[in-house]
């Protein structure tokens, strides 16, 4: 069953939002004013639905509650309780929004780590997030599944990996690891040595590379698609998502091209609802990515698909 592998849907309540604002204020002294402002807005609107509830879009609730995108991100990830020290250690560095994965500096495959050194139990089911960005998304999931799953983030921007590593050490998690790697050419080499099963691969809001001549720079190319499919355990899943329809369609076409191997998860699990075009209505992971929060706060649509590796009976 697809539902046995899917992460449960995450629903937020007004109390959770208030608690999150308090936690954010306690965790980061430099953000006290922002957290207190957010808290006061929530308390003054006791009958408003939480911004995470499906009855309203994030854009509508952002307008109603006067929450800016960074404040929404802070609330979403307040459970991590990231301390002020983390931000001091990692530094406020300027990160390039897009990089060219075809440049010579990214042409050498990254070797696999010593799995016994990066995970407490390297035989646990593994989730890989390709293009893990800041890492907060995986850190949140790792906290929720400390003893049952491992999480690996592959990111092509090294400064983001270094910052995520600081957070991992500060939080003391032993089931999440981040690697500086070009997943397009390194995925197979890295994952093939993992001693446990690969249960889930996510590609969430990857660099769009809009210009047609730059489409070859997009992370999802046939070699990576083949490597993902070959590496997935029977019943394993692929979750794709983008706020750019063209990019979402491009990723969908790659995975739709192997219907004898991958099935749309909503076909196997009727609880996963889709719109008329087959896009998932809700994020099944229990937590939104930072890009997803930013996009929804601006009124953008998010296009999602979940696939499951077909198991013949």
Image (cartoon, grey):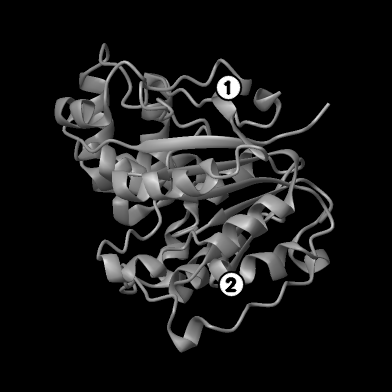
> Can the viewer see residue 25 in this picture?
no
Image: 86 above or below 171: below
Q: Are marks 2 and 1 in contact (CB under 8 Å)?
A: no
Q: Give the distance between the C-alpha atoms of the residues marked 2 and 1, in whole angstroms.
A: 31 Å
Under tag 1, what secondary structure?
Answer: helix
Q: Image point 47% across, 55% down: which residue?
A: 83
Q: Nearer the viewer, residue 58 or 171?
A: 58
Q: Position of residue 45 (x, y in %)?
A: 22, 18
Q: If you read the primary sequence from the N terminus, does the residue marked by circle 2 or circle 1 appear first? A: 2
Quadrant in which residue 193 is drawn: bottom right
Instruction: Name the residue beneath numbered marker 1.
Output: 267
Q: Residue furthest bottom?
A: 104
**Which dot marks residue 185?**
2
- Local crowd size for mark 1, using a 10 Å CA cut-off: few (<14), some (14–19), many (≥20): few
Q: Position of residue 273 (x, y in %)?
A: 46, 19
Q: Nearer the viewer, residue 118 or 242?
A: 242
Quadrant in which residue 111 is drawn: bottom right
């Amino acid at each position: 069953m697809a539902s046995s592998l899917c992460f449960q849907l995450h629903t937020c309540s007004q109390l959770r939002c208030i608690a999150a604002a308090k936690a954010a204020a306690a965790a980061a002294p430099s953000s006290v004013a922002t957290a207190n402002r957010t808290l006061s807005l929530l308390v003054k609107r006791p009958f408003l639905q939480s911004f995470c509830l499906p009855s309203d879009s994030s854009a509508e609730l952002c307008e109603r509650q006067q929450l800016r995108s960074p404040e929404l991100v802070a609330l979403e990830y307040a459970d991590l309780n990231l301390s002020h020290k983390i931000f001091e250690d990692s530094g406020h560095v300027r990160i390039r929004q897009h990089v060219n994965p075809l440049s010579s500096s990214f042409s050498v495959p990254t070797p696999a780590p010593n799995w016994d050194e990066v995970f407490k139990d390297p035989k646990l089911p593994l989730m890989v997030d390709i293009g893990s960005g800041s890492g907060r998304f995986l850190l949140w999931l790792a906290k929720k599944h400390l003893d049952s799953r491992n999480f690996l983030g592959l990111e092509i921007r090294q400064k983001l990996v270094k910052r995520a590593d600081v957070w991992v050490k500060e939080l003391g998690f032993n089931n999440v690891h981040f690697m500086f790697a070009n997943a397009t050419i390194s995925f197979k080499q890295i994952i093939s040595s993992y001693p446990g099963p690969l249960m889930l691969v996510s590609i969430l809001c990857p660099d769009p590379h809009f210009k047609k001549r730059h489409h070859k720079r997009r992370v999802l190319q046939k070699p990576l698609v083949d490597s993902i499919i070959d590496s997935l355990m029977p019943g394993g899943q692929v979750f794709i998502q983008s706020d750019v329809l063209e990019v979402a369609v491009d990723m969908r076409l790659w995975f739709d091209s192997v219907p004898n191997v991958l099935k749309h998860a909503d076909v196997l699990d009727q609880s996963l609802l889709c719109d008329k075009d087959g896009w998932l209505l809700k994020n099944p992971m229990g937590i939104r990515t930072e890009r997803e929060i930013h996009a929804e706060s601006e009124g953008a649509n998010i296009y999602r698909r979940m696939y499951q590796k077909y198991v013949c009976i």
